[in-house]
């Protein structure tokens, strides 16, 4: 196992994206222009462009465009404003983060918790060693704990050898959330650092993050997650030179001079989370809506426990009210007797579970919503700009799908059963930020229509628009051009194409997650494998392969129909839909390549 990690030890995380007032103003201008042009385009689409002879096709497409536009509004609201990159000075003592504490002169105390279930004990040992090297400019009490839900002797031996705490429990109730709750009952640090089994904190973690807690309202700080073992890939110029000779190398070099560096095989699963943390999450700080993502987060114990007590009280109250309503409806009495009401309350208290972290597959974001909605205390969150730890990335498509399905299903379950849009206590800005997150997981429902539309036209000749006329292009092209310009400026410094392609090709998982939740099935709590699963995974991308195959077949059919004549196909419509379909195929090709991807021969060793 040590040999596997040695190859990546010299890698350094990226610096936070720099803040620019001028670029932000340009982004806001382009984003506003895009929304205005988009609204103009959609108004025209609804009023003048629908094909009245094929409303079965025209209406679903225009509805999909409208729903996608609503998602764009939420995305623009999310990215609207950034903040300068700053790191506050670290607090020296407890009183600096808790002004009313009677023990204000005592040093800070921190519990670093590594949650594990069946991961290799030696993998956890690496994180423990890094945690023991945490630096801080003042006296600080750091206690490291292994939270072992696997109850393994080998893991206990690692804890003893490294001189850290070992905490296990008899059951796995609540999975990771229950594991954390159990550990909180046996620890007492003012702050809690949550680490997954593969998390390896940098020495600067505490020194650069605890300063945020000088604001006594800050409940937690999320640091960016960074996968240090992502495949580095190979430069296009190098590949062309080695495989096809000097002429191909010169052509590749010319391409890279125009569009920038191109690396083949780099991050085949689009795991790099910089877009999420450095752009999406960081810009939620202004709305106090950056949510917890688990590993690499630091929590104020007081906030977590207080929020759990409030949530517990609210849940008990709901149980009592529901039981009281059932009894009065059944008995036809106007009220419940005091003795019976007291018995109902007692049963509700004993039935409801008091837990700092909600027993849910997406316990991190669930806890964030609870804390953000506590208007009385006004808890705040912070997305820290600097990477303070490193983790392992999913190294095969099966692992990737397990992880992404859990994210999608957990988020949709919250949306369906405890929608934050209607939760008391959240501000309008917070509701919009959470709406952007949950709404994005519904995108698969209309992305299917965008994937199917060019295929339907190329095979049938039936158009969803009245005509592919100059008026159509006059409306759609300005919108598409302004959209691309706005997104390029808004995410400046990070390439967005891979993320957009991944989002479009995600549709089978998104649809499966949606209908799993709609059927009332619970999303399971699978542990993301930390070892590469062997083999190729084409079976997992059959829907994407179907899109590619049908689109290419449709292109041939449409061109043949033009050549033969006598059909409803027109040159403009066929070319337009072929280009649309080829863009879809290009988006699907990324995940197909990921299914076939194999690590270089010297990387074949497992992380175990």
Image (cartoon, helix red, strand yellow):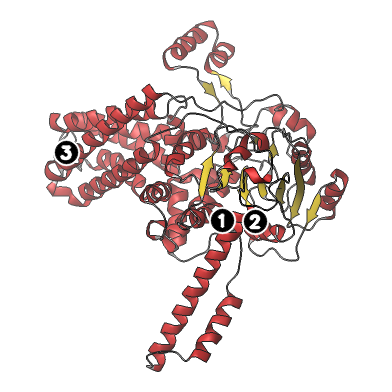
Disc 3 from disc 1: Cα separation = 53 Å
Instruction: Give coordinates of residue 270: x percent, y percent.
Output: 52, 35
Mark toward the start of the polypeptide (3 vs 1): 1
Q: Residue at x 33, y 35 (%)?
A: 581
Q: Quadrant of the C terminus?
A: top right
Secondary element type, mark 1: helix
Residue 232, image quadrant: top right
Mark toward the start of the polypeptide (3 vs 2): 2
* CB-based contact (under 8 Å), mark 3 and mark 1: no
Residue at the disc numbered 3: 568
In the image shown, does 161 or 88 lie closer to the viewer?
A: 88
Check the image and report above or below for 48 versus 264.
below
Q: Residue at x 47, y 92 (%)?
A: 337
In the displayed structure image, the side of residue 159 where residue 423 appears, left or right: left
Q: Residues within 10 Å of mark 3 (few under 14, many from 20)?
A: some
Instruction: Give coordinates of residue 182: x percent, y percent.
Output: 70, 61
Residue at the disc numbered 2: 176
**Is residue 395 visible to us here?**
no
Check the image and report above or below for 333 versus 177.
below
Q: Residue at x 72, y 34 (%)?
A: 136
Numbered tag placed on residue 363 in the rendering: 1
Instruction: Give coordinates of residue 590: x percent, y percent.
Output: 48, 34
Secondary element type, mark 3: loop
């Amino acid at each position: 196992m040590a040999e596997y990690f040695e190859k990546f030890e010299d890698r350094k995380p990226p610096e936070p994206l720099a803040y620019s007032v001028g670029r932000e103003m340009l982004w806001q201008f382009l984003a506003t222009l895009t929304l205005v042009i988009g609204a103009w385009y959609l108004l025209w689409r609804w009023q003048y462009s629908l094909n009245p002879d094929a409303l079965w096709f025209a209406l679903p497409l225009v509805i999909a465009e409208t729903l996608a536009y609503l998602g764009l509004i939420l995305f623009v609201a999310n990215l609207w404003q950034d903040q300068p990159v700053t790191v506050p000075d670290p607090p020296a003592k407890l009183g600096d983060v808790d002004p009313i504490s009677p023990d204000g002169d005592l040093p800070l105390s921190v519990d670093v918790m590594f949650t594990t279930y069946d991961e290799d004990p030696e993998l956890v040992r690496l994180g423990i060693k890094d945690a023991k090297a945490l630096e801080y400019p003042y006296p600080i009490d750091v206690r490291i704990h292994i939270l072992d839900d696997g109850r393994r002797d080998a893991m206990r031996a690692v804890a003893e050898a490294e001189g850290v705490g070992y905490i296990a429990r008899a059951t796995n109730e609540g999975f990771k959330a229950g594991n954390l709750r159990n550990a909180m009952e046996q620890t007492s640090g003012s702050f809690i650092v949550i680490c997954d089994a593969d998390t390896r904190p940098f020495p600067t973690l505490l020194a650069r993050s605890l300063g945020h807690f000088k604001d006594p309202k800050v409940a937690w700080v999320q640091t960016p997650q960074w996968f240090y073992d992502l495949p580095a890939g190979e430069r296009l110029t190098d590949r062309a030179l080695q495989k096809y000779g000097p002429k191909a190398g010169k052509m590749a070099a010319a391409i890279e001079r125009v569009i920038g560096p191109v690396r083949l095989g780099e991050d085949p699963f689009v795991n790099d989370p910089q877009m999420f943390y450095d752009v999406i999450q960081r810009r939620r700080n202004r709305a106090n809506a950056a949510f917890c993502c688990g590993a690499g987060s630091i929590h104020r114990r007081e906030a977590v426990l207080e929020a759990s007590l409030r949530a517990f009280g609210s849940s008990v109250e709901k149980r009592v009210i529901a039981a009281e309503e059932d009894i009065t409806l059944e008995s036809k009495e106007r009220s419940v007797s005091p003795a019976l009401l007291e018995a109902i309350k007692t049963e509700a208290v004993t039935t409801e579970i008091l837990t700092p972290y909600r027993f849910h597959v997406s316990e991190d974001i669930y806890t964030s919503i609870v804390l953000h909605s506590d208007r009385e205390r006004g808890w705040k969150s912070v997305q820290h700009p600097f990477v303070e730890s490193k983790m392992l990335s999913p190294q095969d498509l099966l692992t990737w799908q397990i992880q992404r399905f859990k994210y999608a299903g957990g988020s949709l379950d919250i949306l369906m059963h405890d929608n934050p849009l209607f939760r008391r206590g959240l501000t309008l800005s917070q509701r919009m930020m959470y709406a952007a997150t949950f709404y994005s997981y519904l995108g698969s429902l209309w992305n299917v229509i965008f994937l199917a539309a060019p295929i339907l036209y190329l095979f049938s000749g039936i158009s969803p628009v009245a005509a592919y006329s100059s008026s159509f292009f006059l409306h759609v092209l300005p919108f598409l051009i302004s959209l691309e310009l706005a997104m390029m400026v808004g995410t400046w410094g990070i390439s967005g194409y891979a993320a957009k392609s991944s989002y479009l090709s995600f549709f089978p998982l998104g649809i499966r997650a949606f209908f799993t939740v709609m059927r009332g099935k619970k999303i399971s709590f699978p542990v993301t494998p930390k070892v590469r699963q062997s083999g190729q995974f084409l079976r997992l991308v059959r829907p994407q392969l179907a899109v590619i195959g049908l689109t290419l077949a449709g292109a041939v059919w449409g061109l043949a129909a033009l050549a033969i004549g006598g059909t409803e196909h027109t040159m403009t419509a066929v070319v337009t839909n072929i280009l649309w379909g080829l863009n879809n195929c290009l988006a699907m090709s990324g995940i197909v390549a990921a299914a076939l991807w194999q690590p270089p021969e010297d990387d074949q060793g497992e992380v175990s």
